[in-house]
Each structure stands twice: as structure tokens, then as C-alpha cells.
Amino acid sequence: MSACPTVVWFRRDLRTADNTALARACADGPVVCVWVRDPALLRRRHHRAPGRLAFLRDGLRALDADLRARGSRLVVRTGAPEAVLADVCRTAGARRVVHAAEVSPWGRARDRRVAAALARDGVRVDEVGGDLLVDPGDLPGSSGEGYRVFTPFWRAWRTFPLPRHSPAPERVDGPRLDGEDPGDVAAGDPPAPAGASVARDALVRFIRDGGADGYADTRDDPAADATSHLGAYLRLGMCTAAQVGRALGLPGVLSAGREEFWRQIAWREFFHHLMARRPGVARAALDPALRGVAWDDDPDGLDAWRRGLTGYPLVDAGMRQLAATGFMHNRVRMVAASFLVKDLHVDWRRGETVFMQALVDGDPASNNGGWQWVAGTGAHAAPYFRVLNPVRQAQRFDPGGAYIRRWVPELAGVSGARIHEPWRMTPDEQEAAGCVIGVDYPGPVTDHSGARERVLRLYRDARARSSRAPGGHPSPGDDAAV
Ligand SMILES: Cc1cc2nc3c(=O)[nH]c(=O)nc-3n(C[C@H](O)[C@H](O)[C@H](O)COP(=O)(O)OP(=O)(O)OC[C@H]3O[C@@H](n4cnc5c(N)ncnc54)[C@H](O)[C@@H]3O)c2cc1C
């Protein structure tokens, strides 16, 4: 036990239970809990996300309330983390800061900077635990450089034992410092209620009500909306992969649905490992041969896509769900993302930014992984020449059009198969449906089969240029203009 307090720096771990950094600090003596509102982070384009910030704000409030119930509070301060933490350490007489590890290149660079700055003041910074079930260093793969393909990753990842539940410390004692109101972090209502107890209830409900057991059958049905919606809670550490695994019944044998659900948690970890080991993916294609695609980057196409006005109903439904709720169903994310890249020929990084600015679960690693997967520029399974057909995807995954009608009300009166290709309605059918194409709802912004041919040419040209370049491929792309 030390009389000198430890500062616990909360970031993506807004919970008191199963929080290794907090538990270790409390075991050592008095504790000061801090969250830093870092203007440099909030200025970054991926973080200009009002809904996610409101969700974060409510998560901070919930954490503060939880800490107060244990005799402490969350000290919120604005400024560069190295300056804020140095000041907190000086005021509290602390000589040690602990925090969980992060994988984003920006976060890791910040953490190195903070550790170096605090070391100059004689303060030690310890990285304790992290956002993941398995540390990237513990899964080197046969190459020693981690995994680029999911299935072998999944086979190796799933053999790791789950950590035992670590309850929240009963008391969190330490000096009382002043802080700001977490309410200043953002304005407005979040798309979903935030906090570790809300997350726990959502997880318990999802499993108790059969969501996990039925997952394999329902996960690809956007109209059923039967997935867990845990993404935003995992994103900010209001719940953890280990908590999910234990709630599912691991290490026991899982039903097919639970197994499939656990596999999705592994996808999250896979993309985090990928970013931790290959930070360059945050800026450029993982596949060097596809870093030089000459995108059309048509601003009108991007705008129509963003506003849900492409004339392709499933794509438009997804983009409107995103705008209205900060969420989009996974299957529809795949279709909408594919449409931007492969039908409109817009650089996947532009779509990545649009998603980051709107998704309440927007996460640098998972979002980047999803976009690179769809674009075929990353870790695949899905090679670049596999192009999703937005009409066939809609026919297969929203056959009755219930999801489309929910989010594109102009099409509510369109009957039968025409819901997926409304431009094929005759004038009489349009009148009967109350939807005149080009007036009430746009005609298709592009022709899918022509667009498909063109994107394959763009990718092939990039590969050919890359193979002729000295060293076999161009240097990593620069996303400054994206
Ligand atoms: C283009 C694109 C962008 C995406 N951006 C994000 C993002 O920013 N943040 C994010 O968390 N997920 C992202 N995903 C993955 C997936 O769409 C979401 O995790 C999922 O839709 C969230 O809903 P849910 O919580 O109900 O998921 P569920 O289906 O209930 O899955 C449970 C959890 O598993 C994880 N998960 C599921 N599928 C994936 C996946 N394919 N990749 C990584 N993790 C997964 C998530 O943490 C999710 O909350 C993206 C997928 C695509 C195709």
C-alpha cells in the first residue's frame, strides 16, 4: 500500500468492473480518476461526430455517478493530456499514472508523448490491460507479424482463456480534485442510453431473450434488427469482450447462434490486431498494389450517397438509418460501402470518414477494417473483384422490402419486387404507388453493371502500375486531401 495516490486515466474503458487499471491502482492505495477532454483529438475529422460525443458525455456522467457511489468522482479536465495529467499529479502528489492500452496509431503516439513528458516530471506511466481480450503481442501467428486472414486468427484467438470477472472496487478513495462538468463535452441527445449498467442490461437481455441463440439465423436480416447493438458500448469500454464471453457461457460449449455471435467479437479483435501491428492501414490500403487506384471521387455521387438519394433502395435505406439513428445494420453497411466504392468509384477513405462522423459505434480499427474489407484492399477473404450487387443483396436480405419501406417512406406504397428496382415501374405503377421516379424518388445514379466493369478496370490498372513501379508498388497513399 502506498500513501501516494495513483492517477487512473480513463479513455476507452468507461467502467469500474473488469477494469484492470482501476483495480490495480485501488489495490495500491489512494486513487484519482481522470478523463481528459483533448481538443486536438476532438478536432480530428473522424471525431466530429455529434451523436457519438453525446453518447460519450452520458457515459462519462454514468462513470462519474458510479465512482461517486464508491467515494470518488471522475475529474474531467480540458487540455493536452500531458499538461492536464502533469497538473493533476502535481496537485494530488501522485507519482504514477495508469491507463489501458490502445491500438490506434494516433492514440499510441499520444501515449508515448504523454509518458515521455511525465517522465521528465518524475511521474511513471504504466499501461495496464487494454481494450482487447487478447493482446496483439500474444498472437504473432506463424510469420511473427500477426494475422492477415481472419479464419486462422479466429482459430488461435478462441483458444485463449477468458479472464475471471473482477468486480468493481467497493471503495475508491483518494484526494478530491476539482473538475469540469462532463456535460460540457457535447450537446444534444445521444442515439442510445450510455453507461456500463445499461450495457450490462443490454447484454443480459440479448442473451436471455434468445438473441444470441438465434443470431446465426437473424443476423443478416436488417428488417428484424435482431443484432445486439452492443457496438457503441464495446467501443467505449462500457462492456468488454470478456464480459460478453462469460455471459454467453464460455468456456462451455456454445449453441450455433452463440458461437456465431462470439465469432463477430473475434472480428472486432482481428481488426484491432491488424491496426496495432500495421498502423499504416489507418491512412492507406493494406494491400500495397491497391494504394494507387485512380478514384473518380465525384462529389455529386458522394453527396447523393451520403443523403440516401442514389435511387438504389437498400443503399438509401441504410444511409438514412445511419443519419437518423447513428446505427446501420452490418449487412447494409457492407452494401452501402460497396456501392460507394465500386459503383460510384469514390475512395473508400471518404466513406470511412462519413461513417466515423455518424456511427455511434464508430471505431477507428473496426471501421477501417470494414471499409478495407469491402473495398478489397485489406485483409481478405473478399478480393477486390468481388462486387456486391445492390439489387440482388436487397432481394436476398430484405426480400419483402420491410427495411426499405421503414427508412425510405417514399417507397412505402411500392409493391412486390419493384421495391428493389423502383425505376422499372411503369407510369401507371408509379402513380398507383404514389411515387413518381425522378420526382418523389430519384432514378438510379449509375448503372450497376457498367459501374462494375469500370471499377474492375480501375483496380486492374492500379495493380499493373504497381507491378511496374520500382520495388513493385507505390509508396503508401497520403490521405491528407480525403
Ligand atoms: C463498412 C463497415 C464499417 C463498419 N464500421 C464499424 C465501426 O465503426 N465500429 C464497429 O464496432 N463496427 C463496425 N462495423 C462492423 C459491424 O457492422 C458492426 O460492429 C455491427 O453492425 C454493430 O452492430 P451490433 O453491435 O448490433 O453487432 P452484432 O452483430 O450484435 O455483433 C456484436 C459485436 O461484434 C462486433 N462486430 C460484429 N461484426 C463486426 C465486424 N464485421 N467487424 C468488427 N466488429 C464486428 C461489434 O463489436 C459488435 O458490436 C463496420 C462494418 C462495415 C462493413
Image (tube, rainbow, N blue to C red):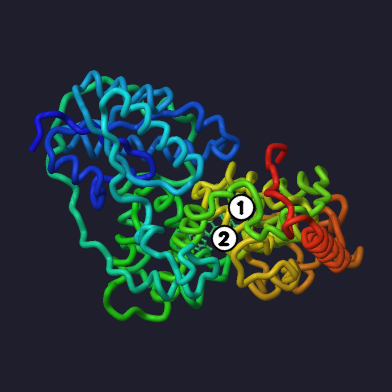
- 391 is higher (above) or lower (below) than 434: below
Q: Secondary structure at mark 2?
A: loop
Please say whether residue 237 is visible from this viewpoint: yes
Assign a secondary structure to mark 1: helix
Disc 1 CB within 8 Å of nearest ligand 1 atom: no
Given residues 317 and 271, the one toward you in this image is: 271
Position in image of residue 37 (x %, y %)? 42, 29
Q: Are the two marked residues, 1 and 2, in contact with CB atoms closer than 8 angstroms?
A: yes
Query: Residue 164 appears in which quarter of the rendering?
Result: bottom left
Q: Quadrant of residue 159?
A: bottom left
Mark number displayed over residue 321: 1
**Residue 96 placed where, x, y %?**
23, 33
Residue that appears at 34% across and 53% down: 239
Query: Which mark's residue is nearer the viewer, 1 or 2?
Result: 2
Q: Is residue 356 above or below residue 200?
A: above
Residue at 36% across, 46% down: 101
Q: Which disc number belongs to residue 329?
A: 2
Image position of 192 with respect to 35: above or below: below
Q: Position of residue 80 (x, y in %)?
A: 43, 25
> Of the numbered discs in the image, which one, if any, rests on residue 477?
none
Q: Is mark 2 within 8 Å of ligand 1?
A: yes
In the picture provided, is 277 more to the left or to the right than 414? left
On the question of residue 64 being in view, the answer is no
Q: Earlier in the sequence, mark 1 or mark 2?
A: 1
Of 105 and 401, the residue lying toward us: 105
Residue 98 lies, with reference to residue 329, above or below; the image says: above
Name the residue at 71% across, 74% down: 395
Look at label 1 and name its amino acid.
Gln
Number of numbered callouts drawn? 2
Circle 2: residue type: His
User: Mark 1 to mark 2: distance in Å?
Assistant: 9 Å
Mark 2, Cα crowd under 10 Å, few <14 / some 14-19 / many 20+, is many
